Image: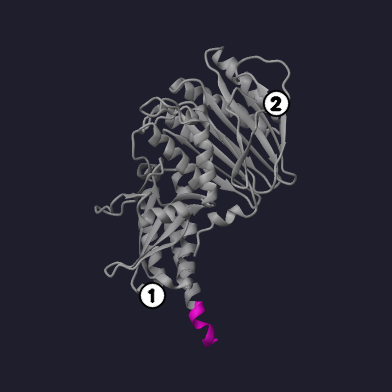
Amino acid sequence: MGGNEPEDQEASGALAALTTLLRETHLAPPDLLPSAVQDAARYLGAQTTVYLADYSQSVLVPMPVGPETAPVLPIDSTLAGRAYRMLTVQSAEAAEEPHLWMPIIDGVERLGVLKLVVRDPADLTDPAFQKRCWWFTHYLGHMISIVDAFGDAVDKVRRQRPRSVSAELIWQLLPPLTAGTDKVLVSGKLEPSSTVGGDVFDYALSDDTARFAILDATGHDLRSGLAAATALAAYRNSRRQGRGLFDQTEAIHRAVRDEFAGRMYASGIVGQLDLRSGLLQYLSAGHPPPLLLRGGKVVKTLSGGHRPLLGLDTGSVEIAEESLEPGDVIALYTDGVTEARDPEQQFFGIDRLVDFLEREAAQGTPLPETVRRVCRRIMEYQNGVLQDDATVLLLHWTTTGQELLDPTI
């Protein structure tokens, strides 16, 4: 029994940290979460600071504990940012404050990073200690998502810019930006995050099917947001009743037509992927055609399944089909991506998008990081001010890509 004592102590320390976090967050408001994390982390022998990514995914913002506030950290140029971007544990052996940066995820969605300051620098390279910290941080990710649902403290940290009413509406409708199963990954993002008007996306994953939609209502204001919300609600309602692609698309069309009486329309793609056979089926309503990436290269533009804009009556529609191979990625986007303009009024264009996607694939960039970088590049191309919403949604049929979303310990 004596030989198992160190291992038992390690396990009890990790268990004590988890149970303390569970106990102290029970019936606690969201703004007390950082204090609960600090109390629980003492059983790991560490002091903590919780950092959350802002909605544009450009900075990491500390959740406050008391009057003192840690600095905001850029995601693209710091060690903490690297932990977030690449989902890898980072260590800093500073003499005054040796610490780890541990990615915070809920499922496979990145939320931020946890800074753990240790007493003994040897802990930084101890695999057992890192594993205990990972258990704790992964559980923390679930807790952040839970408490975010009934308070504003998490949102207040992440919201670094004032948000328009239309963007407020759209953000409440979005699913998690990244999700996955053992067969498929999906990740999306929209910009400008604080003023988005008419773009929205959705998905539903099961053991054998991935269903998805990307929608773009005309305009860039609150009316656009209302049209996008109507379209999304109609899509979800039809999908959840077990309707097929044609009926889902018709439900969206009728809702937009009947509610806005020809004053608003929406483009969109509605599709589903059979995760057993790789059969992709989709309908495109006046929307930019998706790209098919295979082996890291764009090999095809998926240009089938046409019907007019949603809200415009149409005749017969044929569902398009495409046979995918394991590892294929479907890239969906709205026209705000390719029509972003630089100061010389040159469009970003499809060629730049293809080149960017292929370059990130060649570097082995995780799916959500690819999406983040694409959207960041679009914003930079138009000097941070978009004339139209720009949305990217990637769907990856894979059983191996999940490894890149499991923090490396």
What x and y, as percent, mark residue 260? 54, 15
- Image spot of residue 217 (x, y percent): 52, 23
Is-magenta flag for residue 320? no
**Magenta stretch secondary structure, dominant:** helix
Visible in this render: residue 33?
A: no
Which mark, residue 122?
1
Q: Which of labels 1 and 2 is toward the front?
A: 1
Q: Look at label 2 and name its amino acid.
A: Asp
- Taking the image as shown, residue 282 lies to the left or right of residue 268, namely right
Q: Is residue 121 above or below residue 56?
A: below
Pointer 1 with pointer 2, Cβ within 8 A? no
Residue 339 position, x and y percent, is 47, 27
Q: Earlier in the sequence, mark 1 or mark 2?
A: 1
Residue depicted at x 38% and y 36% = 380
Farthest bottom residue in view: 2
Residue drawn 41% across the image and 41% down it: 55
Which labelled disc corresponds to residue 247? 2
Secondary structure category for the residue under label 2: helix
Q: Quadrant of residue 211?
A: top right
**Range of magenta residues:** 1-8
